Image: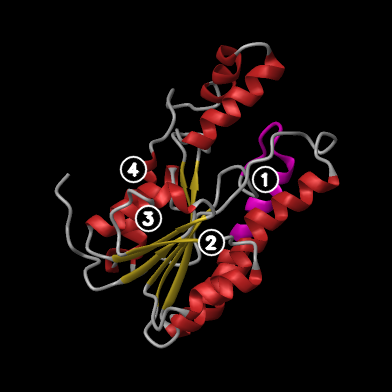
Amino acid sequence: MDLTQRLKGKTAVVTAAGQGIGRAIAERLAAEGAGVHASDLDPGLLADLDVAATAGLDATDPSAVSRYFDGFSRIDILVHAVGYVHQGTIEECSLEDWRRSCAITLDSAYLVIGAAIPKMKASGGSIVTIGSVASSIKGFPKRAAYGATKGGVLGLTKAVAADYLSYGIRCNSICPGTVDSPSLRERIDALGKSMGSPEAALSFFIDRQPAGRFGKPSEIAGLCAFLASDDGAFVTGQAINIDGGITV
């Protein structure tokens, strides 16, 4: 792929960059010239990631998030990709499951974005959250907690966009359909045990994709690079579906 250097000189922070969508985004932003600071709950996943800096970070820990962002004097791009997928209806979602979902997906967004904004106000920048079409956009079976928390992420994204546009800060959410990733494969394996076979679980996920395939992390990363760059300078407060036709 012939990439531009449209992000050269930019400082980018990417959370949950160890694998899947977050890793693809970190790699793409670095390839486009950004100095990428990648973090993940499991720092071992970052060992072979060729970026400016890597760090272990529990994005649900207020103190850890505060210490991490204290290390930046300026941030031009923030991509928050932390999330957790609970499989189950509301009856199958315990209070512990619910609170874990809220902490990982929604509380982390509140903590990370809140810590990054003071580092962006002087010179503006782009914030991208990783939402989902399974949210306030569309309901899916066995996604009660996940849909609720991702819906919260979209609401927070729009509120931040409204509050900080005067500082030159844009905030958008990318809302993927089902994307092939290590976490998806784990969910397929887990669902396969309750459905009787991995094949049945795979069909469950594929059948809801009008395109007949899963999305690729690189496809999400390409959209993220656009939103992070000056090419996306007139885009803010948007929840952008990239879903293979799910919401057509």
Q: Which residue is mark 3?
A: 224
Horizontal placement of 21 versus 94: left or right? left
The crowding category of the residue bearing disc 2, from other C-alpha atoms within 10 Å (few below 14, some 14 to 19, many at least 20), is some
Residue type, mark 1 in image: Gly
Q: Mark 3 near mark 1, Cβ–Cβ under 8 Å?
A: no
**144 part of magenta stretch:** yes
The residue at 66%/35% (across/down) is 140
Residues under labels 1 and 4: Cα distance? Answer: 23 Å
Q: Which residue is mark 4?
A: 218
Which quadrant holds residue 4? bottom left
Horizontal placement of 13 versus 9: left or right? right
Residue type, mark 3 in image: Cys
Q: Earlier in the sequence, mark 2 or mark 4?
A: 2
Expressed as whole percent of the image width and height from the top left, the position of residue 109 reads 59, 63
Q: Which residue is mark 1?
A: 147
Which one is in front, 9 or 239? 9
Which element is circle 4 on?
helix
Up/down of 220 relative to 167, above or below: above
Q: Mark 3 near mark 4, Cβ–Cβ under 8 Å?
A: no
Residues under labels 3 and 4: Cα distance? Answer: 10 Å
**35 part of magenta stretch:** no
The residue at 57%/70% (across/down) is 65
Residue type, mark 2 in image: Leu
Q: Magenta span covers which residues?
A: 138-154
Q: Mark 3 near mark 2, Cβ–Cβ under 8 Å?
A: no
Which quadrant holds residue 216? top left
Which element is circle 3 on?
helix
Residues under labels 3 and 1: Cα distance? Answer: 21 Å
Expressed as whole percent of the image width and height from the top left, the position of residue 203 reads 55, 17
Residues under labels 2 and 4: Cα distance? Answer: 23 Å
Q: Which residue is mark 2?
A: 57
